[in-house]
């Protein structure tokens, strides 16, 4: 009994000690994921250190939360346990999920001063498309990307193509692909013309094709999708034809993770992947390579991708103001430029590209500006209410068609029916 | 009388106090969550200001109409039906092989056991490179033999078998250890008698070895079967359930519904079904096989 009593007292003391905190400064927690290579945690820690120097009254606790998927899981479960982060970088497409669970505060509700309003308007409109819904701004672009094409100039030369001229449209892409696909004596392919990855999140790369074919997959409020639009069916048919009819791309599902390696190994002469892979390709390709905007059909274009800064509801005005201050700090032109150079993401605002650091970087490495120039044709990444379920319906259809299990039209009709069923309860 | 009852009470209190840590841990991490899961499955998923509402069997009705659930169940049954017997058979064969006095026996045993030591995610990543199209190990071998490259994880027909192969490779070595122990328990007298009767090798196996390792076989089978329904690591690491749900297994689907779709109530209903399947499997095995097992 004596021991038990002592234990109880010790436990009570420990709980009290842990529960107590210093109330003099505003403490905020910042969750961030890492989705690209490099010493990213150090960059973030440096930003936080710099912030605390200029804002001694605010203490930011940065928490590295793993991949995007891990981060949303951690943020949501923490929020449900009443312990939400104050600021977090999460996928721009998670917006509706966060809105529906009433976890985030719109920026227009807390950023009311004139300079705040100007700040919200200072980002590329293409990025803001995934930040706004129902007349509110819910996220501020932080680490954003688009899809670009990479090509192996040596392989182009060997195939008798102009190494400085990437395919500008779908027909050229197929024609170049045929020239670039090499087979050995037995007919087995030793080098493919093109790889467009289709594992994990095929909808993102497919969305580039639908955009180029003139289709928009979802409305701005995330309540409707157009999966079986004839233009979308046509785009999917083309995606499947690349491997099944034109035979310029490997059959079946192409893995997202190994596509860059296939490119380095010379197994594919062209690939589509995120601009975030730029630094990776630059350091690993042992041949001359080029980066260009994606080819066009009726128009050019790519969906945007990547993460936004969200401010969570805490019911505490001081903490929300501190969170806003930190979000503004992270998105100044200088920091946007610095972050873009360190990671390969597209600097999120036009004035970031006017900074000296960025000008110097682009003048030494012109490929860095390709994704930015593509922004004028970029569209919002597919994002709806109940997002992951609605996009999964499309992902399943895409993989079924790419693996030859179903034809394009019925597969997309099914996906549309499934998405409509899921979205039924979000209709106004 | 009162003097005699007090110590009696103390014995009970003491007993419970001694069991308390285990009871608390078991209750907090196993029983309470299990019961809560079953209860949650009769409610809707709370969102924001909309609290959970009682919906009765709605989640289960959704499940019956859910083609992905049915596919996951089918995949999982297929997975169990193939990986369990094959890994048991392989484990027994390996155990019989390394039991005898052959050269390099220890090295062989170690080699068979090595896959077990690796964490599943590490093993999955190694196999990911075996399966890579064009330059993966498996495809390089195929090519050297004059076949064309196969996209193992990227085609619906080969993706699930590819995952099964990894599981069998990983589990057989582990089960071998149990069989090895069981084989050493079999009395050599029986084998001597068999030799005197001039019994064939197959007859010896069928009449002596197989019946006598039956308790181990049952134990291993239950474990393998439960493992088959608990598979999630390699699915996440290798295929993400694709292509087109060809490798979606029950637990992975539960994970997806809970942490990608944030539909915790439906995930609870799926978990309840998974729990039920496992319970049925365990009971069937105990009751049906128990009678045929030779215990000494």
Image: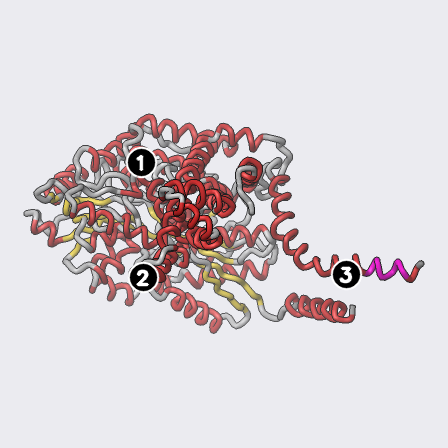
Q: Which residues are magenta?
A: B4-10
Residues packed near mark 2 inside 10 Å, few (<14), some (14 to 19) or many (20 plus): few
**Proximity of marks 1 and 3: CB atoms separated by less than 8 Å:** no
Q: Circle 3 — which element?
A: helix
Measured in 3D between alpha carbons, the distance from the residue under mark 1 to the one under mark 3, in whole angstroms, is 60 Å
Q: Residue at x 65, y 66 (%)?
A: A19
Q: Main secondary structure of the magenta part?
A: helix
Measured in 3D between alpha carbons, the distance from the residue under mark 3 to the one under mark 2, in whole angstroms, is 54 Å
Q: Position of residue A72 (x, y in %)?
A: 47, 51
Q: Circle 2 — which element?
A: loop
**Depth order, front residue of A37/B41:** B41
**Proximity of marks 1 and 2: CB atoms separated by less than 8 Å:** no
> In the rendered structure, the residue with mark 1 lies on which chain?
B
Residue designated by label 1: B157
Residue A382 visible? no
Q: Residue at x 34, y 39 (%)?
A: B243
The quarter of the image holding the N terminus of chain A is bottom right
A6 lies left or right of A342 = right
B29 lies left or right of B223 = right
Name which of mark 1 and mark 3 comes first in the sequence. 3
Residue designated by label 3: B14
Q: Nearer the viewer, mark 1 or mark 3?
A: 3
Q: Position of residue A400 (x, y in %)?
A: 32, 34
Above-or-below relation of B19 to A251:
below
Specify whether residue B220 is painted magenta: no
Q: Circle 1 — which element?
A: helix
Measured in 3D between alpha carbons, the distance from the residue under mark 1 to the one under mark 2, in whole angstroms, is 39 Å
Name which of mark 3 and mark 2 comes first in the sequence. 3
Residue designated by label 2: B104
């Amino acid at each position: 009994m004596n021991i038990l009593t002592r234990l109880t007292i010790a436990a009570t003391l420990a709980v009290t000690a842990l529960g107590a905190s210093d109330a003099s400064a505003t403490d905020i927690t910042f969750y961030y994921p890492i989705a690209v290579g490099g010493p990213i945690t150090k960059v973030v820690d440096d930003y936080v250190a710099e912030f605390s120097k200029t804002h001694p009254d605010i203490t930011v606790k940065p928490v590295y939360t793993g991949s995007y998927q891990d981060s949303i899981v951690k943020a949501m479960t923490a929020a449900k346990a009443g312990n939400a982060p104050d600021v977090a970088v999460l996928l721009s497409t998670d917006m509706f999920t966060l809105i529906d669970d009433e976890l985030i505060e719109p920026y227009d509700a807390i950023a009311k001063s004139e300079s705040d309003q100007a700040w919200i308007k200072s980002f590329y409109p293409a990025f803001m498309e995934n930040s706004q819904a129902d007349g509110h701004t819910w996220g501020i672009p932080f680490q954003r990307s688009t899809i670009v094409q990479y090509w192996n100039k040596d392989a182009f030369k060997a195939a008798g193509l102009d190494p400085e001229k990437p395919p500008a449209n779908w027909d050229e892409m197929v024609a170049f692909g045929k020239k670039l696909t090499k087979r050995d004596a037995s007919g087995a392919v030793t080098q493919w013309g093109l790889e467009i990855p289709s594992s994990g999140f095929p909808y993102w790369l497919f969305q580039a094709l639908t955009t180029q074919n003139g289709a928009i997959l979802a409305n701005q409020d995330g309540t409707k999708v157009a999966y079986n639009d004839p233009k979308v069916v046509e785009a999917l048919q083309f995606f499947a034809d690349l491997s099944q009819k034109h035979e310029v791309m490997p059959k079946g599902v192409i893995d997202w993770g190994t596509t860059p390696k296939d490119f380095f190994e010379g197994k594919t002469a062209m690939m589509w992947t995120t601009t975030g892979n730029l630094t990776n390709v630059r350091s690993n390709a042992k041949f001359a390579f080029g980066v260009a905007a994606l080819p066009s059909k009726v128009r050019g274009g790519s969906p945007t991708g990547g993460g936004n800064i969200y401010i969570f509801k805490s019911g505490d005005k001081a903490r929300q103001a501190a969170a806003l201050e930190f979000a503004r700090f992270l998105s100044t032109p200088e920091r946007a430029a610095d972050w873009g150079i360190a990671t390969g993401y597209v600097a999120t605002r036009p004035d970031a590209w006017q900074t000296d650091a960025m000008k110097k970087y682009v003048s030494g490495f012109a490929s860095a500006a390709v994704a930015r120039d593509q922004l004028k044709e970029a569209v919002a990444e597919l994002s709806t209410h109940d997002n992951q379920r609605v996009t999964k319906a499309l992902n399943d259809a895409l993989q079924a068609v790419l693996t030859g299990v179903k034809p394009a039209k019925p597969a997309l009709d099914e996906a549309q029916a499934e998405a409509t069923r899921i979205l039924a309860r979000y209709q106004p | 009388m009162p003097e005699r009852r007090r110590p009696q009470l103390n014995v009970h209190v003491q007993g419970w106090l001694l069991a308390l840590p285990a009871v608390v841990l078991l209750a907090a991490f196993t029983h309470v969550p299990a019961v809560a899961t079953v209860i949650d499955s009769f409610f809707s998923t709370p969102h924001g200001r909309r609290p959970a509402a009682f919906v009765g069997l709605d989640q289960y009705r959704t499940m019956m109409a859910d083609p992905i659930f049915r596919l996951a169940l089918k995949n999982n049954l297929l997975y169990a039906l193939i990986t369990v017997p094959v890994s048991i058979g392989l484990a027994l064969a390996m155990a019989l092989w390394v039991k005898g006095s052959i050269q390099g026996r220890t090295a062989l045993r170690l080699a068979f056991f090595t896959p077990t030591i690796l964490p599943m995610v590490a093993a999955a990543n190694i196999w990911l490179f075996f399966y890579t199209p064009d330059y993966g190990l498996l495809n390089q071998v195929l090519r050297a033999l004059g076949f064309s490259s196969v996209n193992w994880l990227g085609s619906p027909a080969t993706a699930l078998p590819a995952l099964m192969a990894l599981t069998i490779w990983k589990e057989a070595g582990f089960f071998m250890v149990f069989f090895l122990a069981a084989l050493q328990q079999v009395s050599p007298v029986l084998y001597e008698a068999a030799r005197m009767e001039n019994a064939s090798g197959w007859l010896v196996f069928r009449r002596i070895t197989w019946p006598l390792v039956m308790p181990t076989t049952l134990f291993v089978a239950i474990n393998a079967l439960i493992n088959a329904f608990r598979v999630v690591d390699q699915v996440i690491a290798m295929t993400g359930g694709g292509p087109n749900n060809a490798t979606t297994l029950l637990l992975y689907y539960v994970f997806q519904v809970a942490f990608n779709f944030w539909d915790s109530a439906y995930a609870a209903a799926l978990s309840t079904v998974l729990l039920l399947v496992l319970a049925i499997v365990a009971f069937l095995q105990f009751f049906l096989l128990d009678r045929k097992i030779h215990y000494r």
